Image: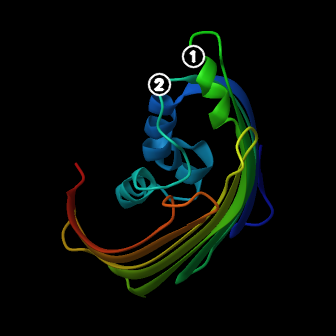
């Protein structure tokens, strides 16, 4: 449900109830933002968003099928030079145990929020900051995870079809399960041709 409060401000709410698996979730994460009708309406579709989403730590990969419930809200402000997006969500996964009885250990409830700030330094160059905070509690395990991600990126449209981006990323997971936590820092450089 999309509502444009003004030409610059939009709110979106989405409810999902579906059966899915990790492969479908990864595909959706990589292409979801660019395919959303409200993203096109706000001219927010960016191939670099798909790259960043594919590296998310939100979902554990497994061949098991699960029932997903998700509630998500978006607030977006699109200014002359500054764009802001705030996205809180709540999500639960209940895994099917018919073919894999151990899949119940993956049942979980997640909630979190994301923030994105995009500032146009020049008409063809922008500076972007994103941060996410996610909390995950496993229902049938004595485990909870807290994930934090932050990135700072500089991108430039150099020609009609070419764009480059340089990004610094920091990811951290604190987990109650020994050995499941990590801290990761990376630099990502990308060149995209968009026909």
14 to the left or right of 134: right
> Residue 73: in sight, yes or no?
no
Query: Looking at the image, do the residues carrying marks 1 and 2 touch, with CB atoms under 8 Å apart?
Result: yes
Q: Residue furthest front?
A: 178
Q: Residues within 10 Å of mark 2 (few under 14, many from 20)?
A: few
**Picture mark count:** 2
Q: Position of residue 95 (x, y in %)?
A: 66, 26
Closest to the observer: 49 or 64?
Answer: 64
> Residue 168: in sight, yes or no?
yes
- Report the Cα–Cα distance between label 1 and label 2: 9 Å
Q: Quadrant of residue 23?
A: top left
Decide: is 127 above or below 4. below
Q: Quadrant of residue 107?
A: top right
190 to the left or right of 46: left
Decide: is 183 above or below 31. below
Question: Which color scheme does this rendered protein use?
Answer: rainbow
Decide: is 169 above or below 142. below
Q: Secondary structure at mark 1?
A: loop
184 to the left or right of 32: left
The mark closer to the camera, 1 or 2, is 1
Q: Position of residue 133 (x, y in %)?
A: 64, 68
Q: Which residue is mark 1?
A: 100
Pick whichever of labels 1 and 2 is earlier in the sequence.
2
What residue is shown at x 62% (from left), y 49% (from top)?
Answer: 38
Q: Residues within 10 Å of mark 1 (few under 14, many from 20)?
A: few
The N terminus sits in image quarter: top right
Give the label on residue 63, or none: 2
6 to the left or right of 78: right
Q: Position of residue 40 (x, y in %)?
A: 53, 50
What residue is shown at x 68% (from left), y 70% (from top)?
Answer: 8
């Amino acid at each position: 449900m999309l509502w444009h409060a003004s030409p610059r401000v939009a709110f979106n709410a989405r409810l999902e109830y579906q059966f899915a698996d990790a492969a479908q979730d990864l595909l959706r994460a990589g292409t979801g933002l660019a395919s959303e009708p409200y993203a096109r309406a706000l001219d927010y579709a960016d191939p670099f968003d798909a790259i960043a989403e594919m590296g998310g730590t939100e979902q554990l990969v497994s061949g098991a099928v699960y029932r997903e419930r998700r509630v998500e809200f978006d607030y977006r402000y699109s200014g002359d030079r500054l764009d802001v997006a705030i996205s809180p969500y709540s999500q639960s996964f209940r895994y099917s145990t018919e073919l894999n009885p151990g899949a119940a250990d993956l049942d979980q409830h997640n909630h979190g929020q994301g923030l994105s700030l995009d500032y146009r330094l020049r008409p063809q160059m922008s500076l972007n900051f994103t941060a996410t905070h996610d909390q995950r509690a496993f229902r049938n395990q004595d485990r909870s995870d807290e994930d934090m991600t932050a990135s700072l990126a500089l991108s430039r449209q150099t020609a009609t079809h070419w764009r480059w981006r340089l990004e610094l990323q920091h990811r951290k997971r604190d987990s109650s399960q020994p050995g499941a936590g990590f801290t990761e820092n990376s630099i990502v450089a990308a060149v995209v041709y968009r026909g």
